Image: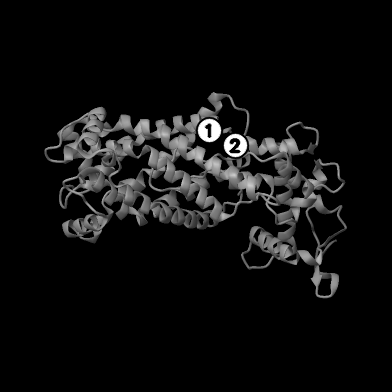
């Protein structure tokens, strides 16, 4: 028999027994344990409540809102295995201990730079014997029954995740741990991210279509406003016309994400990195190349999306009819119009997006990561929103030229110009401002898109049983 006693504070008392569980037929790994007691100082009662909520959520297999002893034992056993894998990944010297330099290196591998003083603060919270190194027992004892986020969770928090979907081409894919790949959790993350992107894009589709209309039709002589653009769409095709082009925009999420992930993993191997995660420069190169491969594979769908967004009522019966008419009238080459500016836009988008994200992340860690490096939801969303916005701002002129090239044949009287000629024409007739037509609705959709993506992503992860993050 094994008896587990938990002690929590009671007013005017330093410690008090809270719960006692007993069980026969324990797993063989735990038969040698006779009694395990956890004493919680009275000032840490709130911490205890957080910890209890966390393990009940993780270990409640029968979803009855209660954690019985058998569920608790399985939670501890599974959690200890994960902690062992994490400890080994952090122990880069393979000496059975983790020091401040190894903590700094683990975060640096992802481009997260913290000072040695901050690493030592993290270390001191776990160090029991004052050696300023953490052995396996100290690591396990601290994290097994402690609600504070550990270093791997911090790393996972700070990943530049694909949940920040604003309907544009996200170049740097998620990186998955060895455990996530081995257990099959990676595809659940991709499905959750894809579902979040689909809901987000659908909710912000009217703004996306307005952006396309303003990119193609707005000019000095036709200064289309946001209100005027929505009025035009409603008069021409009714409220359903606000979602034209959204179907193909949602459908392309699946193949684009899958191709990008597979290409990213292969490029990482080609680069020769033996690390689980890449540094900033390696991620930029691998992510950009993966983005080029994915975009090249699904680019005809990008053209279809633009044509469907610009179509008039009754012009096409659907996506297939649109593709068929383009093929018969304009040939295969029509499906690759705007390809060059689209590919060129990947580099500034990816570079600035990633650089701003890493800069904001490191600035937050340097200033606020005193006792915990867990950024929290709002910090992550703010970093992702700002970095994505900066990336779009830098690459927007190329995106506008791409859209106009894709739409040339659908606009009556429009010249079939090359990329360089279009740039010259826009600057000559509209000035530099003309390269940013449609920017307002594009930025208007960023915050709702990111927020919706996050909420849907988290709920889909729970539904799919994602537990690795």
Res 422 visible: yes
Precedes in sequence: disc 2 or disc 1: 2
Quadrant occupied by the N terminus: bottom right
How packed mark 2 is, by other alpha carbons closer than 10 Å (few <14, some 14-19, many 20 or more), is many
Looking at the picture, how far across and down is residue 225, in whole percent?
Answer: 24, 54
Task: Report x, y in % for residue 5.
Answer: 83, 65
Query: x%, y% of residue 416?
Result: 17, 31
| Secondary structure of the residue carrying numbered label 2 | loop
Q: In percent of the image, x 39 and y 44: which residue is there?
A: 253
Q: For label 1, count other residues whose C-alpha is less than 10 Å away and answer few (under 14), some (14-19) or many (20+).
A: many
Q: Is residue 162 above or below residue 31?
A: above
Residue with the mark numbered 2: 111
At 64% across and 61% down in the image, what residue appears?
A: 57
Left-right relation of 344 to 173: left
Count of marks, rendered view: 2
> Where 184 sits versus 210, above or below?
above
Residue 184's disc is none
119 or 252: nearer the viewer:
119
Q: Say whether residue 292 is left or right of residue 63.
A: left
Work out whether residue 163 can be spotted.
no
Q: Residue sitting at 19 percent across and 37 percent down?
A: 429
User: What residue is shown with label 1?
Assistant: 283
> Label 2, label 1: how many angstroms apart (C-alpha)?
10 Å
Q: Nearer the viewer, residue 180 or 138?
A: 138
- x and y percent of residue 58 in the render? 65, 58
The answer to whether residue 413 is above or below residue 421 is below
Q: Residue at x 68, y 62 (%)?
A: 50
Q: Is there CB contact under 8 Å for labels 2 and 1?
A: yes
């Amino acid at each position: 028999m094994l008896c587990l006693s938990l002690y929590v504070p009671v007013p005017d008392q330093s410690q008090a027994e809270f719960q006692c569980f007993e069980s026969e037929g324990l797993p063989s790994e735990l038969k040698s344990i006779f009694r395990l007691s956890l004493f919680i100082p009275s000032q840490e009662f709130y911490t205890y409540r957080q910890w209890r909520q966390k393990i009940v959520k993780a270990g409640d297999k029968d979803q009855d809102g209660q954690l019985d002893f058998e569920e608790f034992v399985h939670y501890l056993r599974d959690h200890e295995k994960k902690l062992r894998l994490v400890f080994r990944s952090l122990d880069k010297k393979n000496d059975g201990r983790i020091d401040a330099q190894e903590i700094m290196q683990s975060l640096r591998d992802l481009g997260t730079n913290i000072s040695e003083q901050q690493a030592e603060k993290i270390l001191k919270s776990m160090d029991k014997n004052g050696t300023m190194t953490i052995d396996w027992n100290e690591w396990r004892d601290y994290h097994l029954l402690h609600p504070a986020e550990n270093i791997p969770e911090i790393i996972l928090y700070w990943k530049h995740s694909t949940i920040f979907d604003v309907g544009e081409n996200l170049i740097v894919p998620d990186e998955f741990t060895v455990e996530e790949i081995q257990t099959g959790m990676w595809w659940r993350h991709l499905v959750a991210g894809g579902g979040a992107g689909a809901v987000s894009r659908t909710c912000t589709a009217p703004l996306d279509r307005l952006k396309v209309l303003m990119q193609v039709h707005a000019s000095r002589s036709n200064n289309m406003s946001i209100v005027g653009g929505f009025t035009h769409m409603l008069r021409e095709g009714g409220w359903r016309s606000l979602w034209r082009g959204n179907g193909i925009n949602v459908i392309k999420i699946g193949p684009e994400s899958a191709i990008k992930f597979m290409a990213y993993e292969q490029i990482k191997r080609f680069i020769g990195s033996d690390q689980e995660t890449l540094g900033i420069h390696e991620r930029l190169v691998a992510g950009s190349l993966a983005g080029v491969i994915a975009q090249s594979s699904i680019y005809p769908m990008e053209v279809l999306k633009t044509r469907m967004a610009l179509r008039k009522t009754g012009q096409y019966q659907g996506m297939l009819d649109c593709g068929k008419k383009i093929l018969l009238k304009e040939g295969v080459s029509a499906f690759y119009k705007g390809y060059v500016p689209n590919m060129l836009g990947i580099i500034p988008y990816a570079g600035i997006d990633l650089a701003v994200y890493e800069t904001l992340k490191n600035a937050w860690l340097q200033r606020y990561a005193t006792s915990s490096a867990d950024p929290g939801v709002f910090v992550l969303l703010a970093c992702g929103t700002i970095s994505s916005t900066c990336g779009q701002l830098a690459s927007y002129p190329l995106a506008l030229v791409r859209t106009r090239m894709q739409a040339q044949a659908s606009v009556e009287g429009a010249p079939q110009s090359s990329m360089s000629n279009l740039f010259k024409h826009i600057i000559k007739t509209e000035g530099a401002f003309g390269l940013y037509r449609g920017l307002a609705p594009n930025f208007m959709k960023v915050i709702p898109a990111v927020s919706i993506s996050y909420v849907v992503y988290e709920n889909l992860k729970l539904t799919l049983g994602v537990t690795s993050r």
